[in-house]
Image: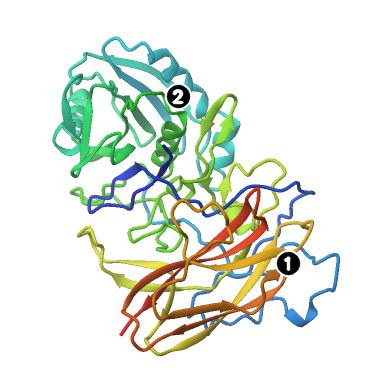
Amino acid sequence: MGYAPRVRTSLGFAILGFGSFVACGGSTPSSELSSDASAPRDGGDASTRDSSDLADASDEPTAPDYGPYPAAHYPLPLLTNFGGPVQSALHIYTVTFGTDATAAQYLAFDDSIVTSAWWTTVTAGFGIAPGTSSGAIALADTVSNATIDDETDIIPMVQALVADGTFPASDVNALYTMYFPQSTTITLEGAQSCAQFGAFHDSAPITTEAGVVYVAFAVIPDCGSFSTDAVSHEIIEAATDPHPTTSMTPPTPSTWYMYDDAWTYGPGGGESADLCEGRPPAMQGSDPVTKVWNNVAAMGSHDPCVPQDLGEIFYSAAVPTQVLTNLPDPTGGPNYSADGFIVMQPGASKSVDVVVFSEAALPHDLALALGSEQSGQSDPMDLAPIGTGITASLSQSTGHNGSHVTLTLSVDPTTTAGDYPFVVRAILDDSAPDYHSWPVVLRISQ
């Protein structure tokens, strides 16, 4: 079963849950990739944002070269630094319980992943250097055949282990990866391990003479096999956002996090690896590892989920959206602001400029599609209507680097207010499939 992000809860836990979505498809053989930056990152309403800096559609060449690559386009969203720390030189401790036959395998992976080529790629631009292994810690098995909770059991466990010296005195760069036995059931705000989530990371407050410090840890349930994809997910998210539990006293701010209700598929945002769940994993040697949203790649108009597949040409159809403020958190947390919206009222119509781009020349034009994604979809052209009373169309069904395509939206006066997610999809090969989707939330407001 694949892994996919769960939105941040009221306590802000970083969770790897079960399920999947796909925002991008496969890859295409490529020539040398462009490193040019994308268009300026301005805000504004989707229908009114100034596009004077974008290439004029009337200037499009007839064929075969549609350069320069990439064409100026509306930018990919970025993770935002909210002021918290990163683990700039991570010290990783591998923690197991009792006699664990897989302990050596866990340690070997933890040791190697923080100095790997994958680590260098996914941490680029985040101020994070290669990490170091601090070795293994084998604890007495007090957790087998037990149900334990993060808040009532695991956080106090970490605090006690620091207090008695079993966990060395920590610093902002320490991370404890805690591998639990298969017979242990872990709960988190009512969710259950290996059913509603696959892994998570958090931090525990430790009171010292100098004040409160936070110890970062990752909880890795045993769901029947050793998932290096899941472990790498939690390690990189702990490094880029080590203390996600914002309700602690005193509060510790998050670090790298994205609030975009379209790209994160629901309210609450996501961390660096959450944003790439549903994509096939990369490989580090023989180990599957998570792909990670990287701002440097996104700003260069490359595939934001790195490592980028060998030979891939990244392309998409960029849609300008707007930021909404003071949005209510459905889990009861504080209100937040998020990008990814086009806002309309019942009875209204709107035209939106969409820009097709690619980082290098493609073998042929892209097919363009529009609509709501469907569960179990195999044909990338097979998209459902956005919603009852909503009409949507594109001014052309194909495009290439630099093409401007008009997205027209019309809302019937009787359409129910609410959020209607949809995608504009660029497709190179619908049989491979090879496609990339640009998600949007159409908000109908009274």
Quadrant of the drawing holding the C terminus: bottom left
Q: Is residue 368 left or right of residue 179?
A: right
Q: Position of residue 259 (x, y in %)?
A: 40, 61
Q: Amino acid at mark 2?
A: Asp
Q: Position of residue 372 (x, y in %)?
A: 47, 65
Q: Which residue is mark 2?
A: 110
For residue 409, above or below residue 185: below
Q: Earlier in the sequence, mark 2 or mark 1?
A: 2
Q: Which residue is mark 1?
A: 400
Q: Does dot 2 land on a helix, a strand or a loop?
A: helix
Residue depicted at x 56% and y 78%: 393
Residue depicted at x 16% and y 24%: 146
Q: Position of residue 214 (x, y in %)?
A: 27, 38
Q: Is residue 315 left or right of residue 66?
A: left
Q: Amino acid at mark 1?
A: His
For residue 85, above or below residue 187: below
For residue 217, above or below residue 385: above
Q: Position of residue 357 (x, y in %)?
A: 68, 65
Quadrant of the drawing holding the N terminus: top left
Marks 2 & 1, CB-CB < 8 Å contact: no
For residue 446, above or below residue 309: below
Q: Nearer the viewer, mark 2 or mark 1?
A: 1
Residue depicted at x 60% and y 32%: 117
Q: Using the image, tell me which numbered label, if any, was put on residue 250.
A: none
Mark 2–mark 1 distance (CA, rounded to whole Å): 43 Å
Q: Crowdedness of circle 2 by 10 Å Cα count: few (<14), some, many (20+)?
A: many
Residue depicted at x 38% and y 66%: 338
Q: Nearer the viewer, residue 280 or 236?
A: 280
Q: Crowdedness of circle 1 by 10 Å Cα count: few (<14), some, many (20+)?
A: many
Q: Does dot 1 land on a helix, a strand or a loop?
A: loop
